[in-house]
Amino acid sequence: MKFEDVIGQEEVKERLLQMVREDRVPHALLLCGPSGSGKLALATAFACHLIAESTRRPSLMGMEIDPQAEAMLAKLEHPDLHFTYPTIKTSSMGSEHQPVSDDFARQWRELLVQSAYISMDQWMSAMDATNQQAIITAAESDELGRKLSLKSSQGGYKVCVIWQPERMNAASANKLLKLLEEPPRQTVFVMVSEEPERLLETIRSRTQRISVKRIDTQAIEQALIQHRGIEADDAHRIARLADGSWPRALEALDSDNESRQFLEMFMSLMRFAYMQKLVELKQWSEEVAAFGREKQKRMLTYFMRQVRENFMFNFGTPELNYQTRAEEDFSKNFSRFINEANILEICELFEKALRDIGQNANGKIVFFDLALQTIILIKKN
């Protein structure tokens, strides 16, 4: 993993590189920021760069990085590079066994080599988790202390990247605190957190915090064009929709992604409501009721966004709209039905449905009622 593999974040990259150049790398860093901003990618690239730089040796070509170390870092298998992350207890583990990162090292490396922009949902799926709660155990902190007590394999830095440290249990957090208070020689901890306020204050106070902002829209746009071969106009639309998240931009490229399905459901609802097709609306509500509750909530949230986008479409100011080409094509003909006379009531209708679903109301009743009310509201002008 190299810094050039990180999308955008030039300011943070330069700050990290400057630490290395000036030989003032702190023993503990805390990278904080929103999901999808590339914190783990930055942490991994920084760890690889720090280890690689410490292997530079004189050669005929000048100071060169050890090619063997470079090859190991490319596969994230260097002995001085350590990862700590939340894990689950599987049915095959003994009753006394506390899971540690090494239990899932293969799955972690496979996922991270594929992309450093991973979510907890992706990681849970890679571990074949069902309803378990992923945590960082006390046994993990013990294992980490043992590993870091060993001498560096090449005489340079040992780096530990801790992903989502806020998921440490109390025992694990206290043991990590001791490591931070008396860090092993030439050891650097890089913590990657989305909820730093959940960390012990004593841990936060022993780190140098770096805030990672959402990725610049232009950086996402350029990455889509250069790395994904996307046409400039489509890349621009996707980058704006991504809202600073590279994973969200990639999701928009997936022809079978959830948003496309939600758009189809939104269009069907509005068309059937306009034509007052009760039988079709009944079938629509039954189809939606078969979704899981979490998916139903995501769909209603999507519907509310589309209502807002269609209302804004009427003002003829493209810079205020954040839509895909397919969404915009529908809005060209539909947006006039979302106006000052009904937008508040439609939003309230969807919000009420969202609350009802969150309170485990019967999905068929909730969505058929929503469909019937839409018939009335969509005709208001």
Image (cartoon, rainbow, N blue to C red):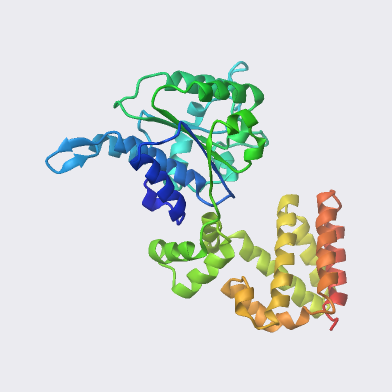
Q: Residue furthest left?
A: 60
Q: Looking at the image, how many numbered discs can be counted on the residues?
A: 0
- Which quadrant is the N terminus positioned in? top left
Residue 200 can be seen in this image: no
Up-down relation of residue 193 to residue 244 (above or below): above
Residue 162 on image: x %, y %: 51, 34
Residue placed most toward the observer, 213 or 317:
213
Q: Residue at x 31, y 37 (%)?
A: 52
Residue 311 shows up from this direction: yes
- Image quarter for residue 199? top right
Q: 345 above or below 89? A: below
Q: Where's residue 104, x and y in %?
A: 50, 31
Apparent side of residue 375 relative to residue 315 in the rendered image (left or right) = right
Indicate left or right for 199 with 56 as reference. right
Q: Residue at x 75, y 61 (%)?
A: 300
Instruction: Check the image and report above or below for 318 versus 32.
Output: below
Nearer to us in this view, 212 or 78: 212
- Depth check: give the residue in front, 107 or 66: 66
| Residue 339, position as x, y percentages in the image | 79, 80
The residue that appears at 64% across and 81% down in the rendered structure is: 317
Q: Quadrant of the C terminus?
A: bottom right
